Image (cartoon, rainbow, N blue to C red):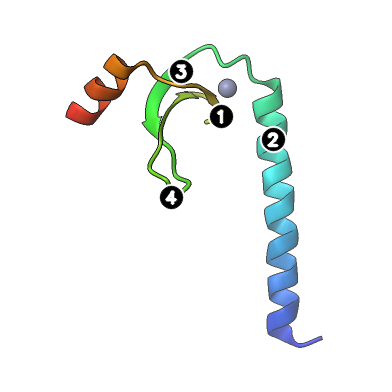
Amino acid sequence: MDAKRKEVDQLLSDKREIERKIEEIQANCKHEKSVIKQVADGSGSIRRVCESCGQIVGYPSLEETYAFLKK
Ligand SMILES: [Zn+2]
């Protein structure tokens, strides 16, 4: 296997491990505090996300969306 391929495989495996850890943290989080945020998935959607773990926990109301956009 060439070195670049090996490095990519290693990085992909690290990525899976990191994603698994994030999922675990989110699954164990009680999402006690949430904030309105633009999600970083390229869609620019505004969601209510947990301040601790970053998981999407709901949708902001129209008022909250307007207040967020005004900032
Ligand atoms: Zn959370």
In the image, is 39 to the left or to the right of 68? right
Question: How far across and down, in percent of the image, does residue 70 sit?
Answer: 17, 27
The residue at 40%/37% (across/down) is 45
List the residue tagged with mark 2. Answer: 23
Sooner in the amino-acid sequence: mark 4 or mark 1 = 4
Give the spatial CA distance, label 3 vs label 1: 9 Å
User: Foreground: 66 or 22?
Assistant: 66
Tell me the quadrant of ligand 1: top right
Question: How far across and down, in percent of the image, does residue 62 sit?
Answer: 31, 18
User: Foreground: 50 or 68?
Assistant: 68
Between label 4 and label 3, give the one nearer the viewer.
4
The kind of residue tagged 1 is Gln
**The disc label shown at residue 34, or none:** 3
Is disc 1 surrounded by few (<14), some (14 to 19) or many (20+) residues within 10 Å?
many
Give the spatial CA distance, label 4 vs label 3: 21 Å
Is the residue under label 3 in contact with that under label 4 (CB below 8 Å)?
Answer: no
The kind of residue tagged 3 is Ser
SS of the residue at dot 3? strand
List the residue tagged with mark 4. Answer: 42
Sooner in the amino-acid sequence: mark 3 or mark 2 = 2
Residue sitting farthest toward the left: 70
Whether ligand 1 has any atom under 8 Å from the Cβ at mark 1 is answered as yes
Give the spatial CA distance, label 3 vs label 2: 17 Å
When the figure is inspected, residue 44 is found, relative to residue 51, above or below; the finding is: below
